[in-house]
């Protein structure tokens, strides 16, 4: 829970900065990643790796090396947990919709909306992980 609390704060900051700083090419790359995500929804292993790379792309779009380093550290901690990409079909589809909302906000250069969208996404991911952990016990 501590990882998710810190992740929410740092990722929302990164998304807000990405809305301000991302280049047009970076936004195109994020949109390409959304398309790819839609193509691999049924492959949990590929999706988990793609999800990590998608979030990293947002970190890079922030153009802030300190946020990047802190989030890389958080991501290492997240990888020690069971892969989140191995959730049910419904969560994979809602995560894609959440990712789309994040990218749309970044593309509109709306920092407030980007921050809110990623906060919502991280909270939903946390709830899905808790549900998964309870089902496996």
Image (cartoon, rainbow, N blue to C red):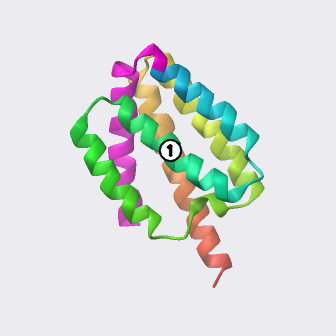
Residue 78 point in image, percent of width and height: 43, 62
Residue 115 point in image, percent of width and height: 42, 34
Crowdedness near tag 1: few (<14), some (14–19) or many (≥20) residues, C-alpha within 10 Å: few
- State the extent of the magenta-drawn residues as a range: 1-25
Q: Mark 1 points at which residue?
A: 53
Task: Name the residue: 48% across, 40% down.
Answer: 118
- Taking 105 as reference, is 50 above or below it? below
Q: Image quadrant of residue 97?
A: top right
- Taking 102 as reference, is 94 above or below it? below
Which quarter shows the N terminus?
bottom left
Horizontal side, residue 79 vs residue 127: left or right: left
- Taking 86 as reference, is 33 above or below it? above
Task: Name the residue: 38% across, 29% down.
Answer: 61
Q: Is residue 41 magenta?
A: no
Residue 45 point in image, percent of width and height: 66, 59
Query: Which of these two is toward me, 20 or 34?
Result: 34
């Amino acid at each position: 829970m501590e990882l998710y609390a810190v992740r929410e704060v740092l990722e929302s900051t990164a998304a807000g900065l990405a809305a301000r700083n991302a280049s047009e090419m970076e936004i195109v790359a994020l949109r390409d990643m959304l398309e790819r995500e839609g193509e691999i929804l049924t492959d949990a292993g590929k999706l988990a790796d793609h999800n990590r790379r998608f979030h990293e792309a947002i970190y890079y779009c922030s153009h802030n090396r300190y946020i990047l380093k802190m989030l890389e550290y958080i991501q290492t901690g997240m990888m020690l947990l069971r892969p989140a990409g191995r959730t049910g079909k419904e969560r994979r589809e809602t995560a894609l919709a959440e990712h789309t909302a994040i990218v749309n906000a970044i593309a509109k250069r709306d920092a407030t909306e980007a921050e809110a969208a990623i906060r919502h996404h991280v909270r939903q991911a946390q709830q899905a992980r808790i549900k998964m952990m309870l089902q496996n016990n």
